Each structure stands twice: as structure tokens, then as C-alpha cells.
Amino acid sequence: MTWHCGNPEFHPVSGPSGTERYGGNIRQFWIPLDPASRLVEDSSTTMKREDIIRMFAGTVILSSLALAHYHNPNWLWLTTFVGFNLFQSSLTGFCPLEIFLRKLGLGRSN
């Protein structure tokens, strides 16, 4: 099977099933031929909500520590809030960020 390339100077190449190759030199990407295939959630490329929450919490904690060191020590209250929220969500299972991510449709559930 042959795949058409977006740039006419390329030779036809074979790629992932149901995709087309666009771009040249450094930037190259594959585009699905079937628009409905974009609606299918690919578990290999979508982060789990739990991982997004951990990444967000870690980023907020590190940012608040840097702000407390360089700006004002009161930023440590943000670190305390995030730590308390992580603690209570481990006991109760209630996490406001998870609800927010679910409503936005971000991340996969498991």
C-alpha cells in the first residue's frame, strides 16, 4: 500500500495504517485519513488523570517553594494546601482537580 506525502518533493512512503505523512526535514507528522479515528482515545499517548494530578501537584509544590525562597515565605501556605489536599484525597477519594479534568475531558480514567 502506498501513502501520499504532503510535500511533492518526497517519494511516497509507507506509514502507520490509515495515515498520511506531511511536512519535511525536521517537522514530519502523520495525519489520520479517517477523521473519526481522531475521536478514539489512544491509551498509549493519553496520560492517566492520576498522572496529570501528580504532575500538577509536583509543579505547584516546586513553584511555591521557589516563590517562597525568592519572593515571600507566605507562599509556603500554598505548599501546605497542596500537601493537605493530597493527604485528604488519599483517605476520601475526593479530588477537586480530578473532577475538573473529567469535566474538561482530559486524561483517561485508568
Image: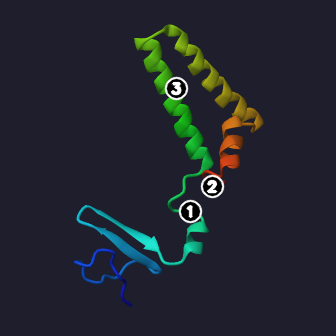
Q: Is residue 12 left or right of residue 37?
A: left
Q: Are marks 2 and 3 in contact (CB under 8 Å)?
A: no
Secondary structure state at the residue bearing disc 3: helix
- Which image quadrant is residue 39 in? bottom right
Q: Residue at x 55, y 52 (%)?
A: 47
- The amino acid at mark 2 is Arg
Q: Amino acid at mark 1?
A: Ser
Residue nearer the viewer, 67 or 86: 67
Q: Residues within 10 Å of mark 3 (few under 14, many from 20)?
A: many
Estimate how packed mark 1 is, as few (under 14), some (14 to 19) or many (20 or more) residues with alpha carbons within 10 Å: few
Q: Is residue 81 left or right of residue 88?
A: left
In the picture as drawn, the residue positioned furthest to the right comes out as 92
Question: Percent position (x, y) of residue 74?
Answer: 54, 9
On the question of residue 78 being in view, the answer is yes
Earlier in the chain: of badge 3 and badge 1, it is: 1
Q: Is residue 95 above or below residue 68?
A: below
Q: Quadrant of the N terminus?
A: bottom left
Give the mark, 2 or 1, whose residue is nearer the N terminus. Answer: 1
Position of residue 15 measured from the top left corner of the image (x, y, whole percent):
37, 78
Q: Is residue 65 left or right of residue 21?
A: right
Q: Which residue is mark 2?
A: 108
Task: Residue at 55%, 73% (x, y): give it.
Answer: 35
Disc ID at residue 61? 3
| Dot 2: element | loop
Question: What mark, if any, has residue 68 been given in the picture?
Answer: none
Helix, strand or loop status at disc 1: loop
**Would you say the residues marked 2 and 1 are in contact, meaning their CB atoms lie under 8 Å apart?**
yes
Residue 90 higher or lower than 63, as above or below? below
Q: Which residue is mark 1?
A: 43
Residue 40 visible to the viewer: no
Specify the quadrant that holds the C terminus: bottom right
